[in-house]
Amino acid sequence: MACRVVVVCSERIVRMGLMSLLEEWADEYVARQAATIREATTDRAWRPDVVVLVPGATLAEDVRACRQAWPRARVLAVPRHDGLATVRDAFNAGADGVAAWGGDDPSAFLDPLRRVRVEDRVLSRQAVDRVLTAFLKSGGCDAQVRLTERQREVLALIRDGASNKEIARRLYLSQGTVKKLISEIFQALGARNRAEAVAAILGVVEILEPARGHPDGERRGT
């Protein structure tokens, strides 16, 4: 059965762009569109599986309104700004996923749209990169986490998708040292992989064993 999607966005051009994209995947999605949540709930017999929300200035309020209107639907927020605070606000308000806004590439939300149906706390690759970038710009400090300058350099290269070998070459380090640094970064964040590192930075997912880290420093689940 095709996934029922409602696109909620006050800007008609953006709405039509996302609808046009979904229509290209008509075998997967049955889509409707509305300028407001109130408009989208006019037909109470039609219940979406996923709400694609392009929120206005009141992001948290809009997400909560979606949750109230469609308690069983998954909510994918596509905010115009997706820094640390914005992503935190979206998740704390009840969003199931956040996709980075990409006006020049609306297809960037297709992957998180598919994932949000079966996963929790979904972040698009673009949103992950921007969260890590914001964290690094803050000096690698968030809550009680503080990374050294070298660890921040390694984390920046992880964000860019560099392999351990590439990191070692670019920073003039041995691969053993790189593995040790990556393990220390994940341990500092209470994470086992890149996804959990981002979750720890956002503070939206509780890591039960903060001392865990990959002894081999390899990234899994990225």
Image (tube, rainbow, N blue to C red):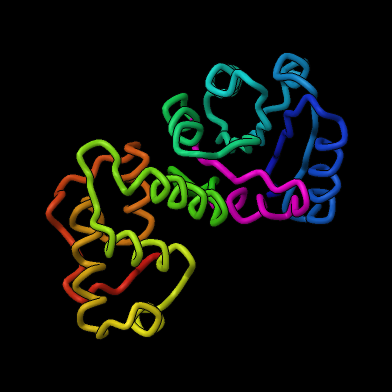
Q: Is residue 221 left or right of residue 97?
A: left
| Residue 109 part of the magenta segment | yes
Q: Residue at x 16, y 72 (%)?
A: 215
Q: Residue at x 29, y 40 (%)?
A: 142
Quadrant in the rendering for residue 13: top right
Q: Position of residue 194 (x, y in %)?
A: 36, 60
Q: Is residue 221 above or below residue 79?
A: below
Q: Is residue 28 left or right of residue 79?
A: right
Q: Is residue 28 above or below residue 171?
A: above
| Residue 220 part of the magenta segment | no
Q: Position of residue 132 (x, y in %)?
A: 43, 52
Looking at the image, which is closer to me, 134 or 24? Answer: 134
Q: Residue at x 51, y 49 (%)?
A: 130
Q: What stretch of residues is rendered in magenta?
A: 95-115
Q: Position of residue 82 (x, y in %)?
A: 55, 39
Quadrant in the rendering for residue 25: bottom right
Q: Is residue 165 left or right of residue 191?
A: right
Q: Position of residue 190 (x, y in %)?
A: 21, 51
Q: Dividing the image into 4 quarters, which one contains the C terminus?
A: bottom left
> What number of labels is visible?
0
Looking at the image, which is closer to me, 75 or 60? Answer: 60
Quadrant in the rendering for residue 148: bottom left
Q: Is residue 175 above or below residue 211?
A: below
Q: Residue at x 21, y 78 (%)?
A: 177
Q: Is residue 86 left or right of residue 201?
A: right
